[in-house]
């Protein structure tokens, strides 16, 4: 893959970043180095190596959502709030 002005312009548009003309050449060189490194990883033969981690088996362990009422914790949190009243946070009105 070659890094040219068209690729830099496309990345700039996609990322909504304005890239200074004076930094484009340096950016092209850095991106080319990154791409070459990743392409080197493709050359490594890993066919005989078992995966040490996989999300296919087992998935993500989930916990049950259980509501707990801890008045001591609630009071501690409200005590450190800028404003509270009757057990609730008081915030500025944002919708008229």
Image: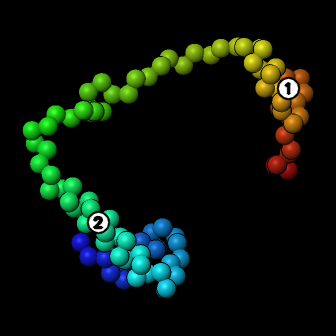
Q: Secondary structure at mark 2?
A: helix
Question: At which x and y percent is residue 47?
Answer: 10, 42
Q: CA distance from mark 2 to mark 1?
A: 53 Å
- Please indicate whether residue 56 sits to the left or right of residue 71 in the image: left
For the N terminus, give its image quadrant.
Answer: bottom left
Please determine whether, in this image, residue 93 is positioned above or below residue 15. above
Which of the labelled discs sits on residue 52, or is there none?
Answer: none
Relative depth, front residue between 52 and 4:
52
Please determine whether, in this image, residue 41 is positioned above or below residue 10. above
Q: Residue at x 44, y 22 (%)?
A: 62
Circle nearer the viewer, 2 or 1 = 2
Which of the labelled discs sits on residue 35, or is there none?
Answer: 2
Q: Secondary structure at mark 1?
A: helix
Question: At which x and y percent is residue 78?
Answer: 82, 26
Number of other residues with Cα within 10 Å of mark 2, as a class: few under 14, some 14 to 19, many 20 or more? some
Q: Which residue is mark 1?
A: 79
Q: In the displayed image of the protein, which residue is found farthest to the left?
A: 48
Question: At which x and y percent is residue 41?
Answer: 21, 55
- Please indicate whether residue 13 sits to the left or right of residue 34 in the image: right
């Amino acid at each position: 893959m070659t890094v040219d002005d068209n690729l830099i312009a496309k990345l700039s548009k996609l990322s909504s970043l304005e890239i200074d003309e004076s930094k484009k050449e340096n950016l092209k060189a850095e991106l080319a180095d990154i791409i070459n490194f990743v392409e080197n990883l493709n050359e490594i033969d890993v066919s005989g190596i078992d995966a040490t981690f996989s999300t296919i088996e087992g998935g993500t362990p989930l916990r049950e959502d259980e509501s707990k009422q801890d008045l001591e914790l609630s009071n501690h949190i409200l005590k450190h709030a800028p404003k509270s009243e009757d057990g609730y946070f008081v915030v500025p009105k944002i919708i008229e």
